[in-house]
Image (cartoon, rainbow, N blue to C red):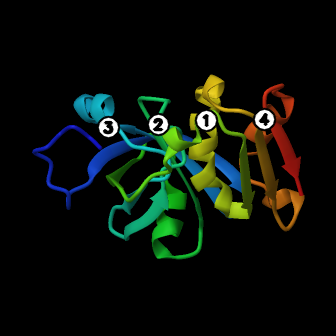
Amino acid sequence: MCDNTNKNIYLPYLATVEEVIDETPDVRTLKLVFQDEQVRDSFNFRAGQFAEYSAFGAGESTFCIASSPTRKGYIECCFRSVGRVTEELRRLEVGDSMGIRGPYGNSFPIEQFYGKNLVFVAGGIALPPLRTLIWNCLDLRDKFGEITIVYGARTEADLVYKRELKEWEERGDVRLVKT
């Protein structure tokens, strides 16, 4: 969690959209940087936790934190546009502000995976919650045995994180199976 203990948990931290990635026609990833440098430096989370993302004037929605906790200075969220809040979040552009509350929830017990072979299985928009764990494991690669990722979607166009799928395919230390 963020080390700022004086923070009211009901008030969001302000963040700026640093990058927008259209994963599919209706799925978008936002790379977000906290505006307060102290929050940016102290915001900690574990793979598997989630946050509340605010679209000012529209409300907030809950999504996993899709970036790895080993990569500091930003967080990412990935969502499908299906309602009022996600449509407003989809309208955000680089430089726009939004709110983030969290992190919340339980996390993956990554330490229990040390020394073991790992198999990740996901389909469609269900990859973001595992992506945070996958990158966490790849960033600590020497702590794990074989890593296999099995991922599929209805169509090739529905695959998210296409750039990363290509990167995982090209790595010599992970096996990617696309279905």
Asked whether the viewer can see residue 163, the reply is: yes
Q: SS class of the residue under badge 2?
A: loop
Task: Name above or below for residue 43 compared with residue 86.
Answer: above
Q: Are marks 2 and 3 in contact (CB under 8 Å)?
A: no
The single residue placed furthest to the left in the displayed view is 6
The residue at 32%/37% (across/down) is 43
Labelled disc at residue 168 = 4
**Residue where numbered disc 2 is placed:** 69
**Residue where numbered disc 3 is placed:** 43
Looking at the image, is mark 1 or mark 3 nearer the viewer?
1
Report the Cα–Cα distance between label 4 and label 1.
12 Å
The residue at 79%/34% (across/down) is 174
**Residue where numbered disc 1 is placed:** 137
**Quarter occupied by residue 141:** top right
Left or right: 142 as drawn, with respect to 119:
left
Q: Position of residue 42 (x, y in %)?
A: 28, 32
The three-letter code of the residue at mark 2 reads Pro
Looking at the image, is mark 1 or mark 2 nearer the viewer?
1
The single residue placed furthest to the bottom in the displayed view is 83
Mark 2: few/some/many CA within 10 Å (<14, 14-19, 20+): many
Mark 1: few/some/many CA within 10 Å (<14, 14-19, 20+): many
Q: Mark 1 vs mark 2: which is more N-terminal?
A: 2
Q: Are marks 2 and 4 in contact (CB under 8 Å)?
A: no
